[in-house]
Image (cartoon, helix red, strand yellow):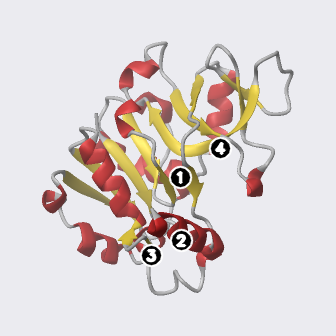
Amino acid sequence: MKAMILAAGRGDRMRPLTDKLPKPLLEVAGKPLIQFHVEKLVAAGFRELVINTSWLGSLIEDFLGDGSAWGCEIQWSREPAALETAGGIIQALPLLGSAPFAVINSDIWTDFCFAGLQASKLASGPGAHLVMVDNPAQHSEGDFVLTSSGLLRPRNGPQASGDRALTYSGMSIFCAGFFRGRATEKLPLRPLLDEAMQRNRLWGEYYAGRWCDVGTPARLAELDAELTIL
């Protein structure tokens, strides 16, 4: 199975750090964020990676190259202007192929084992499977409710005993058909997830391990301090 790392964002909340350096190359514990993902994906058996770039993308390409130094093959999906999450995936579909693929946000850090991202989790039919985590302080209400059956439901809808409102971790598996018929344009992912949820085609799993949305300089510094101590 191929994996796509989303690395095209401008990182406005990270300014001024991202004025001259793309967010995926910001470091924690002496290592760029995107390097953690590449190494963990290769260790989990992923050998074909697709990475989209836009803002200062050439710096990311210069760092990772064709992937041979990391034990994988990297193909690049270049966006003259960032297409947002869904738009970036849609543009990259010719590189990703027709089989299910994993998608990882570059601006997170986690100890999740990427070997757990398996196409078999979409055996119930075409759709998407999201890894969900506990709600962080900056997003206390969460994104979706994970039901006991593994389906994701709206956060503001009816809930049964055992249902939990959780946050999307930025780690997922998609069927290529999830994006079929969509034009390549600037398009966020959330509307497509909501549509899939209405069709009972959005599944999830809960991960209780370590995860951080590295979205601000303060959270970057906190994570750096935490990992440097370890």
In the drawing, what numbered circle is on residue 225?
Answer: 2
As drawn, 167 above or below 161: below
Instruction: Label 4: state its secondary structure.
Output: helix
Q: Mark 2 belongs to which amino acid?
A: Ala
Is residue 78 visible in the rendered image? The answer is no
The x and y percentages for residue 56 are 40, 78
Is residue 113 visible in the rendered image? The answer is yes
Instruction: Label 2: state its secondary structure.
Output: helix
Residue displayed at 53% across by 65% down: 226
Q: Mark 3 belongs to which amino acid?
A: Pro
Q: Are marks 1 and 3 in contact (CB under 8 Å)?
A: no
In the drawing, what numbered circle is on residue 22?
Answer: 3
In the drawing, what numbered circle is on residue 190?
Answer: 4
The residue that label 1 is drawn on is 85
* Nearer mark to the viewer, of 1 and 2: 2
Q: Earlier in the sequence, mark 1 or mark 3?
A: 3
Q: Mark 1 belongs to which amino acid?
A: Thr
Q: CA distance from mark 3 to mark 4?
A: 24 Å
Q: Earlier in the sequence, mark 4 or mark 1?
A: 1
* Nearer mark to the viewer, of 2 and 4: 2
Instruction: Label 1: state its secondary structure.
Output: helix
Q: Is residue 109 left or right of residue 169?
A: left
Q: Residues within 10 Å of mark 3 (few under 14, many from 20)?
A: many
In the drawing, what numbered circle is on residue 216?
Answer: none
- Residue 2 sits in quarter: top left
The x and y percentages for residue 37 are 37, 54
As drawn, 136 above or below 99: below
* Nearer mark to the viewer, of 1 and 3: 3
Looking at the rendering, in which quadrant would you find the N terminus? top left
Q: CA distance from mark 1 to mark 3?
A: 16 Å
Choose between 95 and 220: the one closer to the eye.
Answer: 220
